[in-house]
Each structure stands twice: as structure tokens, then as C-alpha cells.
């Protein structure tokens, strides 16, 4: 189990008054940065052009110069004969021309940059099991701060308030954008799920009686909204129809804190506070009309390799059957699974609680966010799992992480009540025409429901 301090419920009136004086998503510091929606540049950030910062970079080194610097002092000691002033001047001129003011034998990469932008996030709930940050396909970031959901338009750098729920409903416990980037699902502490149209700030519908307690994680699969609750139940909801609850998965005995659909939409990964990781096959999902326990335990794989809660989940973008998972404070491991064979391919002890995972969409790299002791982001090279960089700045565990639509910028939110942006994955390749997909607008038939 991983401790998730539920500070919001027990905060004092003084703390609440102080948080009201702080403007949500206001800029902290002087650095101005707005991540673009698209970029045609293929140049990665400067700190990644020079190789690993812990290992000498061969591309930045001249071995002829290095050999000269290593052998010249020895030759000078051995050659003690007196030389003419003209020959000495020639030697110095030759050395200056050859070295070009270079005196270092080994060339190392410089330190990675700090966050490009930092925003204030008062009342951010410091709870490991929740999912309070998401970045939609229209370049709008949603974040839940206490009872309120805010939207930050990354293209414009503007902030708006979408909704503030009543105290008996909140706080907000999860947010997740639909594939169209316009509609947002919001999970609440009282077990309800609200569906909002962000363009008109209108509540479309409320899904009730899905769970018996708070809904801490959400995941979209086209028109299907999958919800995971503290009751251990996972439910597929078809938002186009009135009787929305269509499938139920039962396999977790404690709170479900991580849900991720594969890119194909065929497989669902779920992680829970019971230290279990399940892979579910959508094609064999059981209808909730048949509540037999024997019919509802239809997991494809059940992995018991972690020794703490499994929240961090990430499907690999370049290998469809590869899943990365991260364990909590008493596990600290990132594990890689072949979801076709059900085998663990690798396990890496990171040394600290793994809160979130994100793959680089353009290169074979994985980013992880962590808790005690450094509260850092770690960029790993896959499959060697060599550390490329560590990004520090947060002063509390980095609980939530989201990726921009172009895959370059990463937003992180932590218990220190700050939201930070990192240009960690560089710039994307030139965009290719996107293939047309079906059911990209799950609310297209909403008028029929009404």
C-alpha cells in the first residue's frame, strides 16, 4: 500500500483562506513559456544534442587533440634542449591553431534545464491514488484543485474555470479528456462521474451508481469511458446510450488507481492498491446484465510482480504489446511486460516511489516521475534503461504527469502545489496526415439521449 495523504478533507480554515488568496495557475517566477500545439522543427533540445551528461560524449570530442594534450607535457619534460625564439613562437602558434582554445580532454553534457514554466496550483490534493491532471488533443490542460476543475489553454496561456462542485460531491478525484479534446470526464469523491462540454462549459450528463465510493481513475476508448473506483470495480460506460453501464471487470480487491487502454483499444491495463496489475481483453468483456462472479473475472493476464500499489501505467507507442508499469514506495520498480505472452521482460529498481510513466513518442525513451527522496523526473533510454537525465525542481512527490499533443512537452503536478512544464522530449518530426478513425466524437449522438 502507498500512503496517500488526503490533505484537502482535513485542511484548516486558515489554510483554505490562504489558498483563496492565491490565483490558481498563476505564473510563478519570471520564465515565460507557452508550449506550441505543433512544430515542424526536428531539432531536439540542446541538452540532448550532446549525449548523456554522466558519460563523455564521443561526438563532442576530438581524439587527435586529446592525444596531443595527453602526450605533450611528457614530451616537453623529455626534451630539455634549448630552442630558438623563432621555433618556440612557431610551436605556440601551431598549438593555438590546433587546439583552438580547447583544453578539455573529455567532453561532458551540461546539466538538463529546469522547468520551462511554473504555475501555482493551490488546493492540489496530495493523494497518490488520484489522477488530477490531463492534456487534451486540442492543447488544453485540465487540472483539479480541490473542488474546482481549471482549464489552461497552452496555445494562448489563458486559464478558465470549468466547474466547482459542492462539498458533498467533492473533491474532484480524477479528470480525463475524450479523444476529441472537447469533452471532459470528471470523477468525484461521492462516486459520481460528470461529463462536460468544455467549449460551452455545459454539463452534459452525470453517471450515477456506477461505484460505491470515489472514482480515482478514468480512461477513454473512443465512445467508451472506463471508470475505476475505490470499491475495486472497473466499469465500461457507453456515453452514447441511456443505460451506459455495459461491461464490468472484477479482479481487484482494493482501490483501482491506474487505467490505460492500448492504442488499438483491444486491451485495458489496470493497476490497484492490492499490488495487482491486470490486462483485460475488450472482446471478452462481460455484460453487467450477467453479474455472475465467474463471468466477470475475465482478465487476460494477472501480474503479481509488484510489492506496492500500481498506479503508473504506459503502453509503448512503438511496440503494441509492450506495457510499462511502476510500483509504489515499497516496490520502487519499473517493470516491462509482454502482454501477448504474459511475461515480465525486465525490472529496474529506481530507488523511489514511481508515480507516473510516459513514453517518448519520437524516440525510444521513457520518463518516470518519483517521490521521496529527490522528487525528480528521470529520463531513461529504452531498452538499456540507462539514465539520460534527471530533472529536479519539485519539492514534494511528483504525483501527476501529462503529455502535450505533439508529444514534446510534459506537465507535472506535485504535492508542493505547483504545476511545471518541461520540454523534455524535444521537438516532433514533421506531422504526417492523421488516419481517419471512427467514433472520435463520443457525444455526436447526445441529442438522441435527451
Image (cartoon, grey):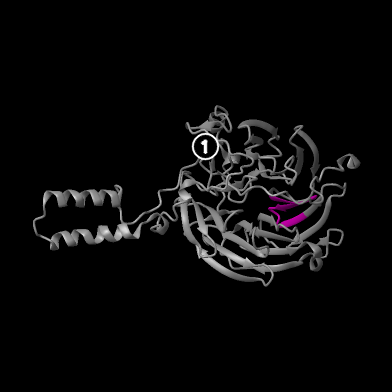
Graded by Cα atoms within 10 Å as few (under 14), some (14 to 19) or many (20 or more), the crowding at tag 1 reads many
Callout 1: SS: strand
Asked if residue 229 lies in the magenta stretch, the reply is yes
Identify which residue, 440 or 151, lies in the foreground: 440
Residue 357, by quadrant, is bottom right
Residue 243 in sight here: yes
Q: Name the residue under label 1.
A: 118
Asked if residue 75 lies in the magenta stretch, the reply is no
Identify which residue, 335 or 182, lies in the foreground: 182
Position of residue 205 measured from the top left corner of the image (x, y, whole percent):
81, 40
> Is residue 76 toward the left or the right of residue 119 in the image?
left
Magenta region, mostly helix, strand or loop?
A: strand
Q: In this view, does 414 lie above or below 378?
A: above
Magenta residue span: 217-235
Residue 391 in sight here: no
Q: Residue furthest left?
A: 82
Position of residue 5 measured from the top left corner of the image (x, y, whole percent):
56, 47
Name the residue located 55 percent from the left edge and 49 percent from the top edge: 425
Residue 273, by quadrant, is bottom right
Identify which residue, 220 or 429, lies in the foreground: 429
Quarter of the rendering occupied by the N terminus = bottom right
Q: Which residue lies furthest to the top in this view?
A: 21
Amino acid at each position: 500500500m502507498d500512503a496517500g495523504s488526503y490533505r484537502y478533507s482535513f485542511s484548516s480554515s486558515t489554510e483554505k483562506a490562504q489558498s483563496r488568496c492565491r490565483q490558481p495557475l498563476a505564473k510563478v517566477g519570471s520564465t515565460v513559456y507557452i508550449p506550441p500545439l505543433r512544430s515542424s522543427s526536428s531539432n531536439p533540445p540542446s541538452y540532448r544534442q550532446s549525449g548523456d551528461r554522466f558519460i563523455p560524449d564521443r561526438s563532442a570530442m576530438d581524439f587527435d587533440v586529446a592525444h596531443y594534450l595527453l602526450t605533450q607535457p611528457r614530451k616537453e619534460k623529455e626534451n630539455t634542449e634549448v630552442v630558438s625564439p623563432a621555433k618556440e613562437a612557431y610551436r605556440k602558434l601551431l598549438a593555438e591553431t590546433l587546439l583552438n582554445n580547447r583544453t578539455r580532454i573529455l567532453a561532458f553534457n551540461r546539466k538538463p534545464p529546469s522547468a520551462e514554466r511554473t504555475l501555482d496550483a493551490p488546493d492540489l490534493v496530495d493523494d497518490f491514488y488520484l489522477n488530477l491532471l490531463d492534456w487534451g488533443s486540442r492543447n488544453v490542460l485540465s487540472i483539479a484543485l480541490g473542488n474546482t476543475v481549471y482549464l489552461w489553454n497552452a496555445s494562448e496561456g489563458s486559464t478558465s474555470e470549468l466547474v466547482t462542485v459542492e462539498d458533498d460531491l467533492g473533491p474532484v478525484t480524477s479528470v480525463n479528456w475524450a479523444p476529441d479534446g472537447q469533452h471532459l470526464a470528471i470523477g468525484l469523491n461521492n462516486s459520481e462521474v460528470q461529463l462536460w462540454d468544455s467549449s460551452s462549459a455545459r454539463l452534459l450528463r452525470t453517471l450515477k451508481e456506477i461505484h460505491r465510493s470515489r472514482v480515482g481513475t478514468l480512461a477513454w476508448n473512443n465512445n467508451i469511458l472506463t471508470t475505476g473506483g475505490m470499491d475495486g470495480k472497473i466499469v465500461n460506460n457507453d456515453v452514447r446510450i441511456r443505460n451506459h453501464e455495459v461491461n464490468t471487470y472484477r479482479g481487484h480487491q482494493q482501490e483501482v488507481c491506474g487505467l490505460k487502454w492500448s492504442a488499438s483499444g483491444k486491451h485495458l491495463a489496470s493497476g490497484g492498491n492490492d499490488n495487482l496489475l491486470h490486462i483485460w481483453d475488450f472482446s471478452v468483456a462481460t455484460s453487467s446484465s450477467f453479474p455472475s462472479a465467474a463471468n466477470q473475472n475475465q482478465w487476460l493476464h494477472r501480474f503479481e510482480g509488484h510489492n506496492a500499489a500500481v498506479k503508473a501505467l504506459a503502453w509503448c507507442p512503438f511496440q503494441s504489446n509492450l506495457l510499462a508499469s511502476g510500483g509504489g514506495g515499497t516496490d520502487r520498480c519499473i517493470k516491462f511486460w509482454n502482454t501477448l505472452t504474459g511475461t515480465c521482460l525486465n525490472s529496474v529498481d529506481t530507488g523511489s516511489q514511481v508515480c507516473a510513466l510516459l513514453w517518448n513518442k519520437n524516440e525510444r525513451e521513457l520518463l518516470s516521475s518519483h517521490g521521496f527522496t529527490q522528487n525528480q523526473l528521470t529520463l531513461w533510454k529504452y531498452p538499456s534503461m540507462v539514465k539520460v537525465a534527471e530533472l529536479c525542481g519539485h519539492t514534494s512527490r511528483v504525483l501527476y504527469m501529462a503529455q502535450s499533443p505533439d508529444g514534446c512537452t510534459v506537465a507535472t503536478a506535485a504535492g508542493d502545489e505547483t504545476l511545471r512544464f518541461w520540454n523534455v522530449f524535444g521537438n516532433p518530426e514533421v506531422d504526417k496526415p492523421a488516419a481517419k478513425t471512427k467514433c472520435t466524437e463520443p457525444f455526436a449522438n447526445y441529442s438522441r439521449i435527451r
